[in-house]
Amino acid sequence: QFGAEFRRFSLDRYKPGKFEDFYKLILHIHHIANLEVMIGYADVHGDLLPINNDDNFFKAVSSAHPLLRVFIQRQDEVDYSNFGTNTLSRKKKALVTLRNDNLRRRPHINISMPHDFRPVSSIIDVDILPETHRRVRLYRHGCEKPLGFYIRDGTSVRVTPHGLEKVPGIFISRMVPGGLAESTGLLAVNDEVLEVNGIEVAGKTLDQVTDMMIANSHNLIITVKPANQRNNIIRSSRMSGSSGQSTDSTASHHSLPTSHVLQNFHPDEMESDEEADIVIEGGLEPQHIPKLHSLTSSSLSRINGSSISHRLQRDLVLNNNSGRESNGNIHKLLSSLKTDPRHSLVIPRGGIEEDGTVITL
Amino acid sequence: MRRFLRPGHDPVRERLKRDLFQFNKTVEHGFPHQPSALGYSPFLRLMAIGTRSGAIKLYGAPGVEFMGLHEENNTVMQIHFIPDQCQLVTLLDDNSLHLWSLKQHSGASELREEHRFTLKGPPGSPPSATQVTAVLPHSSREVLYLGTESGNIFVVELPSFRVLEDRTITSEAVLQRAPEDYCNRRSCELVEALQEHPKNPDQILIGYSRGLIVLWDLQNNKVTHHFLGNQQLENLYWQRDGSKFISCHYDGSYTQWPVSSDNRHPEPLENFVPYGPFPCKAVSKIYWQTTKNGLPYIIFQGGMPRASYGDRHSISVVHGSQQIAFDFTSRVIDFFIIFSSEPTAEFDDPSAMVVLAEEELVVIDLKTAGWPAVHPPYLASLHCSAITCSHHVSNIPLKLWERIISAGSKQNIHYSSMPWPIDGGTNIAPDPPQRDLLLTGHEDGTVRFWDASGVCLHLLYKLSTVRVFLTDADPNDNMNPLGEDEWPPLRKVGTFDPYSDDPRLGIQKIYLCKYSGYLAVAGTAGQVLVMELNDEDAEHVVDHAEADLLQDQEGYRWKGHEKLKTRDGPVRFEAGFQPFVLVQCQPPAVVTSLALHSEWKLVAFGTSHGFGLFDHQQKRLVFVKCTLHPSDQLALEGPLSRVKSLKKSLRQSFRRIRRSRVSGRKRRGGSGNASEVQEANAKFDQDTLQEMELAPVQRKIEARSAEDSFTGFVRTLYFADTFLRDSSRHCPSLWAGTNGGTVYAFCLRVPPAERRMDEPVRAEQAKEIQLMHRAPVVGILVLDGRSNPLPEPLEVAHDLSKSPDMQGSHQLLVVSEEQFKVFTLPKVSSKLKLKLTALEGCRVRKVTVANFGSCKTDDYSENDLAVLTNLGDIQIISLPFLKLQIRYPCIRKEDVSGIASCVFTKYGQGFYLISPSEFERFSLSTKWLVEPRCVVDMPEVTSNNHVHNKSGMENAVRKS
């Protein structure tokens, strides 16, 4: 029953209605009214995201361009880890912070599992930092929101052997409402910025720190000394509050007040993000469609944009009937679609479809 | 983790690095910013210029120059050479005196500060009591006479600066024997002038500001003569034989006074207001020079009629019936006359007048009829019109060099042929290793060609693009018809002219091919001119093509300036570079990048809207590419609308003034006081830090996006013959990089030479690379199979470079402001990279490939990237492995215009503006170092004679 089935149907983009209606509609179209299913969709970045309440349904519809690819899976087959962990390399067991206040205020709504959300930020390295510091990672990757904060010069007071000393420092000066920084709740105005991606900002000018942050904006890790110290994680609760990799930290790091080592940060991971320069070959050449290879993740790095939808179908046809495994394949497929999350921005007018080969690096 | 490994622990490489790289600031070219004092030693034949930032620079024969910096960074008020010594004394505006001397050290002379001294009065006395107003180094070389505001004259011993209190000349003593009524009327007030008697060193002439002049006998400590002037005194000058002197006054007059032993209170011989009868400005300095033919030269500064010419900066030369008022475009700081300094000579016989104006040095030949100007070999005013861009070309072929010099010599016919009169010292620096050209583009549409081979930056040739266009100003306006009956007889001299007729004429990009003599020049209003060197005058029509960079994009309106109107019909061009084609970008936005390929006869140009390729052989536009993001309204409309740009340029010029004041503080001192300079800088940095705290600024943290403004701005263009499509065939290609981190590559088909005119050049887009980090692309380079940068066009044809390796695989280097990245070719995939901004917080401002030779062996050299960051650091990065080799702090990070003006040479040197008028030259190489190395010898023989004569003379005087 759950094989290669495709339905195409239309919805009013501006009045999508309620999730419940949509759910019913789906079941109706697919003639599977008697099954518990999980509905997901592929967002602009190719991430598989869940649809299970009015809000994310509305989001899904409004972000559809122009097609909304909806995936329907039997509830018991769903591998939650596929949702939201948006790339192969992104499978970090980092602490995921969820801030969706809308959802919390309305408890009757069906809230998805934590894994249904894409991480937007996380606190990392809790175990190796002093309790007064906080290392925040902002995942701008695959997020439409602006980073949305400002920094300024200021003075901070340090304890030195000679007593208290005023030293210049960099502080967060403003949050853009609705921005990523604000929505995480992990950063606040007047927090002092100590490090950017593991590099101390002491001795650097405001402009230098600005440039460093922007250069790292795709994967920004800021270590701050929060102005408000009340919400700090207490050491004793480390095991529950810190990330899964906390035990890796060595004793020597432990004693350092501010470590230069980022624990939960793999350079390779950053590389992979950054390597994603886009090369469009032969802009004026007639397009040619390369042969499709088997769907290993490496071969997925070379795909043909014009046949995305076509291939999607084939992949689903090929793989979807094999139960649990299908999830993995869907995920692979999606990750291949999104290896470059920006392609939709770069070639806004369907450039890919017309310009031939796309290689993501 | 890779990035925690410190680079360079290979001892062999470390040693090699020491043989290759070394950072030196070697010499300052151009005209000192804000000069404040001038001095000259007829004995050493050296000139000294002091500045408001406390620098002192000595110049002699071309190549002979010295530089010193006063620790105080205070304005130099006066400079006096000690007679017959390699020493000079400076007076700063903090009333401190400094003794400098030229001493030989390991074969070359160096300028060192020896002593400093501040005159102190008795406790409780007002500061004016010791405020020095006049300095007289006595010919005995043992004492300095210091006239003060209080009217007292103090005597200090040299070189110890010990005050000889018993020899102080008080105003009371001076007034003792003056007529009663005169004394009542005026007090002595401040000492305006001190002059030693030319024949009798025991007598000095003292001039007080209220007009009283006395001759003081040093032996008997008393006044011998009172000259009762009643006009406010400006200055004094002795006639050579000491029988007369001349005084000049605030009211624009000068007066001759006789000096004889029989009259102790002589009346003036003559009182004359040269530009009377209406009220005149002060005559602030005067020379009286005797000649063999009996007619003296009277040379004086100022004195112009107050109402109609009060704003002129003039120096008048009167010789018999000849009179010219040289009219300078900026304030006259000071001047001196070069005349026969032989003590035995009977007459002064002046040969030249040297005038230091605020913005330039002008030397007038007084021996040649008509008094033409002399072309200075150094101290060129780089900022005659503001510098808008620079371009350096190394190792110019002799043929082109000679042709440029010949074109330039035709422009310089109005200069005097007199050899440079300030010729002290000996240049012992080795001959420059090669012929280098520095081209500067200016706001007025000119390009100046400078000989940048050696220590003296010398103007070879000036090219003007103005003739191609119709501008408001008639070019003939500047010709100053010498009306004979004009009064005053003003004659404009000098080249400083900061007023541009039309800002659109400004030159923004220059590209010279040294092998073919093709030159491309692009400007503010989207004009691109291609020129060819012609040794003769010629009259021809300039072909005209338009390049619409917006192509079919509709609904956009350019709100910036209009394009320049062109002249119809044939235009006459003087010998030199003559334009033959004009490509006009539409919209006429400022040209932001330019590349010329002289072998393929192609020129590429880019603006904020896109880029284009023009075939200048067939005079045909090959293609245009719009790079504009549709939502980029700011770039579309042109931020430089005419009104705005004027405002902006005004604002900028104010800023420039302010900034240059600041940058003026930073001066390279002798090796001894480098640390002091740094300290001063640190102090300054601290000041700015405090300022920052007063005015909190904030910076937005946001990732770059395609919608940002000016992403389409074309930053760099590059021609390469490489493997663009497949690894078996290479082809000509054009590469372009934008502000938004996009690189476009076009495959070009250039017809073979025999069919070059018959078939069109074709271009096809082959690649488009979008850098993930979207930082502006500032450099593109292709490395050949041996990882060497591809040679320049025609370089191989002229046997000056090995042919590139076309067998191995080529690599593409893309330099963005944030990182360096090497890609494979033809399939573009990332190979390695070096991140700069993410790790260090600095950004690439300038990047060039430079060749570094080893100072130890002649047979080793390598190519590296020379990089200037926005923090003013210079980094050397190896090719092709992108390893940071070394880093030097070079420019202060606050000095934005300095960083923006920096150019690197192909052999590891560089230039940047330290003020609007000065280039600092630096070297990163151990091998290519151009710095002054010179010797100033005490002219021993003459000196002995001189002293001998003088003492003989003294004896004679005493006897009589």
Image (cartoon, rainbow, N blue to C red):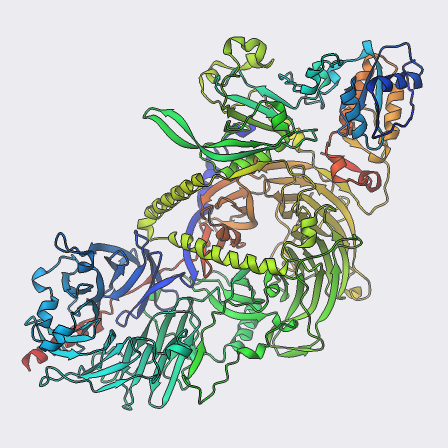
Q: Quadrant of the C terminus of chain B?
A: bottom left
Q: How many marks?
A: 0
Where residue A36 appears, as percent x and y from the top left, is 85, 10
As rendered, which of B383 and B622 lies closer to the eye? B383
As rendered, which of A291 and B67 lies closer to the eye? B67
Say above or below: B638 vs A31: below
Where residue B400 appears, as percent x and y from the top left, is 58, 68
As rendered, which of B137 and B736 lies closer to the eye? B137
Say above or below: B724 vs A195: below
Q: Quadrant of the N terminus of chain B?
A: top right
Relative side of A42 to B452, left or right: right
The answer to whether residue B392 is visible is no
Q: Quadrant of residue A28?
A: top right
Say above or below: B406 vs A266: below
The answer to whether residue B120 is visible is yes
As rendered, which of B605 and B168 lies closer to the eye? B168
Where residue B516 appears, as percent x and y from the top left, is 64, 65
Where residue A197 appears, as percent x and y from the top left, is 55, 28
The residue located at (11%, 66%) in the rendering is: B170
Relative side of A231 to B803, left or right: left
The residue located at (63%, 44%) in the rendering is: B776
Q: Quadrant of residue B818?
A: top right
